[in-house]
Amino acid sequence: MGTRAHYGMNAVQEHEYALLGGLNRSKLGRYLNLIAAAISAAIVFALLSAVDFAKRLGIPTNLPPVVLSLASAASVFAALYWLFDKYAWKWPKLGMLLKVPDLSGDWHCDGQTINADKSLGYVWEAKITIIQTWDKIRVRLSTKQSGSNSVAAALLCDEADGYHLLYHYKNDPNIAERDLTSHRGFAELIFSKDRKSGHGEYFNGHGRYTFGTMKLRKL
C-alpha cells in the first residue's frame, strides 16, 4: 500500500461488508417488517376513517387505489430501510446498540514500510476516505503515485480494544508510474473508541510483496 495508493481509473462502487459481533441484519429486517406493517395498518385505517367521515358530512370523496398502494407495508418498509441505511444507524445510541461504528469520512494516514529483516523502510503519507452505510462500505486510500480501493471488508466491535476494520484491496498505480505494478493486499485497522484516531498493519501480495504499519488521524 503506502506510496502505492491513489484512486484507480476504473469506476468503483461500495460493497457489502460482514458485521462481526453486531446485530444480525436478518433480525433487523424482521423488526423493520413488523414496524412497517404496523405503520401501514395505521395509515390505511386513518385514510379509510377520513373517507368515511367525509361521506357522513356529505362530501363526495374518492380514494384512489394508488394512495392505498403507497401506504402498503412494502412501501413503508422500503422508506424505513432507506432512512435507516442512510441516517438512523449513525445515531450514537442506536449505533451502540447495533455495535456498528460510523467510520465514514476522511483520515490522514502516516505509513511505515518494514523490510524483511525487520528494519524500517521508507515512510509515506496518504489520505483514506471511508464511505459507509448500514450495509455497504468502501475504503479508498490515495497518494500521489497510486490508489487502492477495498473489494471486501468486515467490521468488528471489540469492547476492549476498539473497532476493527479488516479489508482486502486492489491497488492501481497511475499510468505515469512505470516502476509500479498493480497488486492486491490486506489491511487491519483498529480505531479508538472515540473514532478520532487509529492504527494498523498491511501487507501486499499478488504483484508486490511489502508490508508495514499505519497510523490514522481523523480529518
Image (cartoon, grey):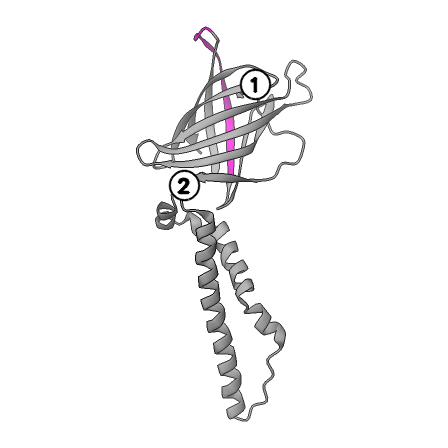
Q: Which mark is residue 125?
A: none
For disc 1, the marked residue is 205
Dot 1: element? strand
Q: Is residue 104 at all visible to an observer of this figure?
A: no
Question: Callout 1 environment at 10 Å: few (<14), some (14 to 19), or many (20+)?
Answer: some
Residue furthest to the top in view is 117
Residue 88: give x, y in percent of width and height: 44, 52
Q: Which residue is found at the position 50% from the left and 36% from the top?
A: 130
Find out whether the residues at labels 2 and 1 contact each other: C-beta distance under 8 Å.
no
Is any part of residue 216 visible from this angle?
yes
The image shows residue 17 at horizontal and vertical percentages of 51, 39
Give whichever of 81, 120 is nearer the camera: 81
Q: Is residue 162 above or below residue 145?
A: below
- Tell me residue 191's x, y (percent): 39, 32
User: Are there few (<14), some (14-19), or many (20+) residues within 10 Å of tag 2?
Assistant: many
Residue 177, horizontal then vertical, whole percent:
66, 17
**What segment is highlighted magenta in the picture?**
117-131
Instruction: Establish if 18 lies above or below 176.
Output: below
Q: Is residue 160 left or right of residue 32?
A: left
In reply to whether residue 122 is colored magenta, the answer given is yes
Q: Earlier in the sequence, mark 2 or mark 1?
A: 2
Residue placed under numbered mark 2 in the picture = 101
Direction left: furthest residue: 160
Q: Could you say which quadrant of the image residue 3 lies in?
A: top right
Q: Amino acid at mark 1?
A: Gly
Main SS of the magenta part reads strand
Q: Amino acid at mark 2?
A: Pro
Depth-wise, is mark 2 or mark 1 nearer the camera?
Answer: 1
Task: Specify whether residue 178 is painted magenta.
Answer: no
Q: What is the secondary structure assignment of the residue under circle 2?
A: loop
- Residue pictured at 41% horizontal, 46% vertical: 23
